[in-house]
Image (cartoon, rainbow, N blue to C red):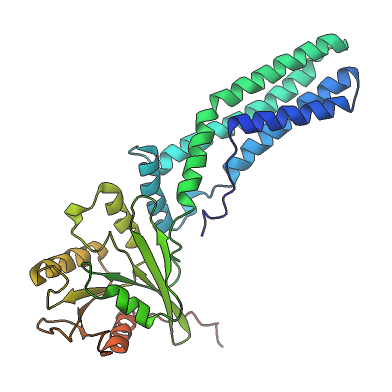
Amino acid sequence: MIFESLPTTPTSEELIDQAFSRAARAGRAKQGVEAQQSMLQTASNILGDNLHNVVTEWPDFDHVDPFYGELADAILREEFASEDGIDELRQHLSELSWASSKTHDLGREYIGRLPNDAEKARSLRKQGFGRMGSVMDQVEDDLEAVGAARDALKTLPEIQPDVPTVVVAGYPNVGKSSFVNAVTNASIETAEYPFTTKSVDIGHFERDHITWQLVDTPGLLDRPADERNEIEDQAVSALTHVGDVILFFVDASAACGYPVADQQALRAEVGDRFGDAPLVTVCSKTDLSAEIEADCYMSVEGGEGVTETLTAAVDAVGHEPELPFEE
């Protein structure tokens, strides 16, 4: 996942301590004016290079997959308590880029101004350190914000946008989790959205040597849009970029606690939201009731229709692997 490898963002205090302590060691290795020059060079390099690295470790959001871009924007809007997510992060990174250039410039400026007198050079070097410290004070909040953004995004659910994906939807307790557990070839991966206490469940299965992804999103696609907050709604929008087909589960018995009419209304809403992605309606819990019109009828409990439901999802997509060019 693109944000998982982002390194921990240092604080302003940590960078200042590192730069000035390393500079002091560099100065002790030399004498007179040369020692002051070495200290300025070391401090400016450490500050400038580390700030530059913080900025360049982040991906270019203009080239991030739309799923991760939109989800990241939602999470950062929540993190920053702002109407801007990615744009605000870009502003913080821009400030750090300025500070990187400024600390390098200050190192060069003060090295160029050092007199031949060792004591005067020492005084000027201290002045240079003071100005570098002032620059770091100016970006203290920017470093903190970038660090908070990194911590929020590193826990994003690891959904793979380039893998054909079945999104499972429907009200709670309609049999979605039982189905996902029944058809996946490994244990379910569970991850939490940073903006909710709900988890996303991700499973995988293979069909015709192609690995497919199954995504169940409790807290997002299990209730009407007017019950989701703005951040959750944007997360649903992000999911539209990865959903190749929607399996919508309806419990015709209403044993799930939701009237069939409400379930069908949510189905229509989800279908509209995902636009061109085919929607396959699954009547689940057929051991209790099958009294609705659906594309598939299934009972995980009774072991009926499970494979057929998965096949219907795959067939609805019509996904074909890319084959090597043949003469």
Which residue sits furthest right? Answer: 31
Q: Position of residue 237 (x, y in %)?
A: 30, 57
The part of the image, by quadrant, that contains residue 180 is: bottom left
Residue in the image at 68% along x and 37% along y:
49
Q: Position of residue 66 (x, y in %)?
A: 40, 57
Q: Is residue 46 visible?
A: yes
Residue in the image at 33% along x and 58% along y:
198
The part of the image, by quadrant, that contains residue 16 is: top right
Residue in the image at 17% along x and 63% along y:
269
The part of the image, by quadrant, that contains residue 250 is: bottom left
Depth check, front residue: 102 or 132: 132
Depth check, front residue: 199 or 89: 199
Q: Position of residue 291 (x, y in %)?
A: 9, 83
Does 115 appear above or below 156?
A: above
Q: Is residue 241 visible?
A: no
Q: Position of residue 186 (x, y in %)?
A: 46, 78
From the image, which quarter does the C terminus lie in? bottom right
Does 40 appear above or below 192?
A: above
- Number of numbered markers: 0
Depth check, front residue: 49 or 252: 252
- Taking the image as shown, residue 224 lies to the left or right of residue 212, namely left
Does 297 appear above or below 16?
A: below
